[in-house]
Image (cartoon, coloured by chain):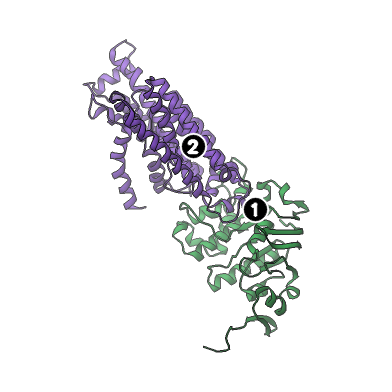
Amino acid sequence: MTATLATERLRLAVRDRVLVDALDLRIEPGQVWCVLGPNGAGKSTLLRTLAGLRDTDGGRVLLEGRDLAAWKPLELARHRGFLPQAVVDAFSLTVLEAVTAARHPHLPFWAWGDEDLGTVRAALSRFELDELAERDITTLSGGERQRVNIAALFAQDVGVMLLDEPLSSLDLHHQMKTLHELVAEAGAGRSVVFTVHDINLAMQHATHAVLLDGHGSALAGRKHDVVTSEHLTTAFHHPIHGTTIDGEVVFRAARLTDKRP
Amino acid sequence: MATFGAALRLCAGLLALSTGVVLASVLLGGDGSTFVASWQGLVSTADTPMRAIVHALRIPRALAAYGVGGLLALSGCLMQILVRNPLADPYTLGLSGGAAVGALGAMLAGAGAVATAAGAAVGALFACVAVFVLAHRDLIARRRAAHRDDATDLILIGVMLASGFGAIVSMMLVLAPDRNLRGMLFWMMGDLSGVASPWPPLLSMLAALVVAAPLGRQLNLLARGEESASALGVRPNAVKSAIFAIASLATAVAVTTAGTVGFVGLVVPHALRRVVGNDQRVLMPASALCGGMLVVVADTISRIVADPIQLPVGAVMAIIGVPTFLFLLVKRR
């Protein structure tokens, strides 16, 4: 299942503040995009707009060449998945139920949903959740819950995967594991877009990048063209320098004082 | 995770149990009527006084109690999902207050049972419409702002309306002549003695279940938050409006039939959640069936224990229900 997600002169505004102005993106199957930017720059807003959960404030978002607004919600849910920044469960349910629920868009209206659990089991074991399958999700730690929600996105089995801060509250191993699985999915022909705060993790795994500064300017393209010391320093209003270690560029934010602790 | 087969077996079991409970309720009575005499009244075709009591009084009353309990428990279940709050019950959105104002108003005017029921229905529907008009942005806005705590406004609107209606009810009670007071208090605590026909609540319960059951999978997703639900193809506005309508109408029918029977709508979904889990496809029918049984049991006790005086069914239910629920709560699964 593959799909191309594109934007045409996309404009995002929250109240009177323009976050993004005239952004053109073309996210092809096999690409991994990271969205970088300071707090409040519109990373989540961009992702929710790409997911069709929010109307654009100008311009269009196209999936397979068709305006997102023209897709039926259920049909859309078979092609693009979205991981919200936080999922707040009002009631307890098991991990297995939470991941199985994500199969909803693929089931016929009257189906119960316990007929085909192959995809669900596969997603659970990919994120090392087999042993937690019968646990109540509200009793899990924040990182475990995050893994459950990522596994649910994998079980949804979609061409375009949009993840809002997938790495938040994950330990280092699971951060790398999640990124590894996302890159593997891109290798299998899906496209992945995720927001992240760690520039180096993004650079290690993404193929493309969007850099927002929160004042209307958005840079998008191949990661080495977008993520440079110069661009980062401007966007974050903070000196950030790139150095090369073992052939990979690593970015370091400058300490605000000269003193070493 | 509940499979379809397990859910079906559970519902069949509960249905069989319900039949037993209703039958027991029909056979039990005060004023010296024995089990055997009641059974003969039930099955014989001879025109005895016992036959009249069983067929004209006990059967309609037991069935109506079952329907009212089922409607309230199902409505509580739906309301808890709608406002994403386990403390919600059928009356959270001020519906009972509206119905009380309507019914007590009719009683004050000296109207009979039919007009009282009509007053309750009008009051309940008025409260529904008021909530819908005030909260329509919450319920039907197509795409809302990110991370808004969407359920809070709805609860606040309901609580405000309930307080307003409560104030009007207090004034009516103060101003009412003494001879009306007893009937008014009984109405407010739930009273099934004046039931005319069991069919409106029973058929409404069936209809509500048939309409709500297919929404089960979408309700499960909605319980995980609107954003993730809409990313999975659910239209939260449509589903929320639907459950608001179903829950409100179900409560309106129950209130019209039996006054404000409390407790069942809050506690039955809660207690069952601990036993059968939180899959709405299982929880909704199970709540309806168990709610029905609970009210039948409470109503049977309320008419037998202090015979010939009838106790208010809501109070009886709370007295047996509270310790049971606390036991479940403390035991944990």
Percent position of residue A198, x then y: 61, 73
* Residue B112 visible in the picture: yes
Q: For chain B, give the colour.
A: purple
Quarter occupied by residue B237: top right
**Residue that numbered label 1 is attached to:** A53
Q: Is residue A235 above or below residue B25?
A: below
Q: Chain of mark 2?
A: B
Q: Nearer the viewer, residue B79 or A5?
A: B79
Q: Which mark is residue B247?
A: 2
* Marks 1/2: CA–CA distance: 27 Å
Asked which secondary structure carries label 2, the reply is helix
Left or right of A241: which side holds A144? left
Local SS, label 1:
loop
Instruction: Give the x, y percent position of residue B249.
Output: 49, 32
Q: Amino acid at mark 1?
A: Leu
Does B304 sit left or right of B23 as displayed? left
- Against B143, residue B295 (above or below) is above
Q: Which chain is green?
A: A
